[in-house]
Image: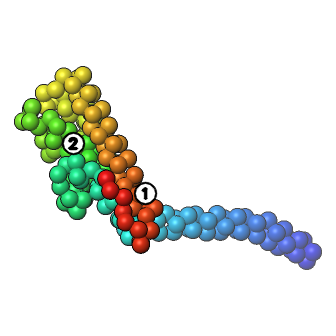
Amino acid sequence: MTIARLISFTTATLASPLLLGISGSASAQGRAGHAQAAAAHAPAQRPSADQAAKAEKGFTAIAEKLNTTPDALKSAYDEARQANPKLTRGQFIAANLLAQHLGSKNSSITTQAVLDGLNSGKNISTTLESLGLSPSEATDAQRAANRELREAERQSAASSKATSETKPDQDKPNR
């Protein structure tokens, strides 16, 4: 009888840690799988109202240079993003500036042509070269567009800072 008890005790003592180890790792794997599934099915986050206002304010700076409204520019950007989700705001604005500046010299350079080039995986310089510019002309045009964008953003920042510094009962400074 003592041998039977000893065998059952030994079996129970050896089997318990094995069973606990197997069930512990299985439940950990189940939790990891659940976390992955939850992340995969999480709804896409929409930009907050603050982010949307900031994005629209970002188009205010350049809209005047492009002779359009910030709303029209934002809706054109949203439309272009549907065609190319990897399109950045900077690329979109550069495409518009380049088309405005170079379109009169070369009719094949349009906003849509530049956006199509970006959508096909080319960068802006390569796209401009494929539309008929030399490599140096493409680089110069891109630099000019970037300079104009920075200038417009500086002017917008300065004007919004001046507006925020004036008190409601004071007149706004003349420009």
Q: Residue at point 85% right, 72% down?
A: 9
- Three-letter code, disc 1: Lys
- Residue drawn at x 51%, y 68% as measured from the top left: 34
- Residue lying furthest left: 107
User: Which residue position holds label 2?
Assistant: 97
Indicate the amino acid at tag 2: Leu
**Residue 57 visible here:** yes
How packed is label 1: few (under 14 Cα within 10 Å), some, or many (20 or more)? few
Residue of label 1 = 161
Q: In which quarter of the image is residue 132?
A: top left
In the picture shown, does residue 110 fall above or below 68? Answer: above
* Element marked by disc 2: helix
| Screen quadrant of the N terminus | bottom right
Relative horizontal placement of residue 38, taking residue 172 as reference (left or right) = right
Per the model, the C-alpha gap separating discs 1 and 2 is 25 Å
> Residue 55's spot in the image, x, y percent?
34, 59
Q: Which residue is drawn at 16% across and 26% down?
A: 133
Viewer-nearest residue: 155 or 49: 155
**Position in image of residue 119 (x %, y %):** 22, 44
The spot of residue 61 in percent (x, y) is: 30, 52
The residue mark sitting in front, 1 or 2, is 1
